[in-house]
Amino acid sequence: MLRLNVHPVFKARGIDNPYYFLVKLGLSPYTVNNILYNGVHSLDLRHVELLCKALVCEPNDLLEWSPGKNQFYPDNHPLQKLKAKPIPIDVQQTLSTIPYKDLVEIGNQIKSFQKQETNTATEVKSELEV
């Protein structure tokens, strides 16, 4: 069964009040309750796009899959990639316990990663324009 599971992404982004966050994005309280408490039976793609934009993620990050009773899917089936993942660490709490010099190094690694991502995106864009 495929379901919407936004809580790990909220936790990874340090969003302590997802209800307020989603209402502030412009979603109705009814829709927010459905999203947060697994009342979603169909997805409005505008909502998925809004969530992905605000949370800087992709749709697969918001979805979770588990096979139904008496259903078998081979290990190489694409849906296996959507199986429940462990909830990420509390980044803010973890960062508060790391020594300062290590934080500086982590910051440098993040900048390097972001630079690589930007360069890759620029290269792809250039290739598409040719």
Image (cartoon, grey):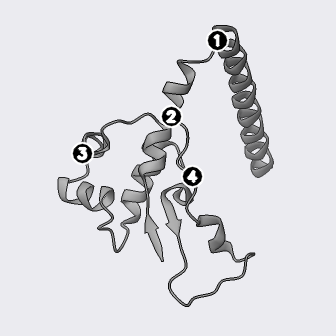
| Label 1 – label 2 distance at C-alpha | 17 Å
Asked which secondary structure carries label 4, the reply is loop
Amino acid type at mark 1: Pro
Q: Which residue is mark 4?
A: 86
Q: Which residue is mark 1?
A: 99
Label disc, if present, on residue 90 of the rendered structure: 2
Graded by Cα atoms within 10 Å as few (under 14), some (14 to 19) or many (20 or more), the crowding at tag 3 reads: some
Q: Relative to residue 96, is residue 88 depicted above or below?
A: below
Q: Position of residue 118 (x, y in %)?
A: 71, 34
Q: Decide: marks 4, 2 in contact (CB < 8 A)?
A: no
Q: Residue at x 73, y 16 (%)?
A: 105
Q: Which residue is mark 3?
A: 23
Q: Position of residue 86 (x, y in %)?
A: 57, 52
Q: Earlier in the sequence, mark 1 or mark 4?
A: 4
| Label 1 – label 4 distance at C-alpha | 26 Å
Q: Earlier in the sequence, mark 4 or mark 3?
A: 3
Q: Position of residue 31 (x, y in %)?
A: 24, 59
129, 35: nearer the viewer:
35
Q: Relative to residue 29, is residue 102 depicted above or below?
A: above
Asked which secondary structure carries label 1, the reply is loop
| Label 4 – label 3 distance at C-alpha | 26 Å
| Label 2 – label 3 distance at C-alpha | 23 Å
| Label 1 – label 3 distance at C-alpha | 37 Å
118, 69: nearer the viewer:
69
Amino acid type at mark 4: Pro
Amino acid type at mark 3: Val
Asked which secondary structure carries label 2, the reply is loop
Amino acid type at mark 2: Asp
Graded by Cα atoms within 10 Å as few (under 14), some (14 to 19) or many (20 or more), the crowding at tag 2 reads: few
Badge nearest the viewer, 1 or 3 = 1
Q: Relative to residue 23, is residue 73 depicted above or below?
A: below
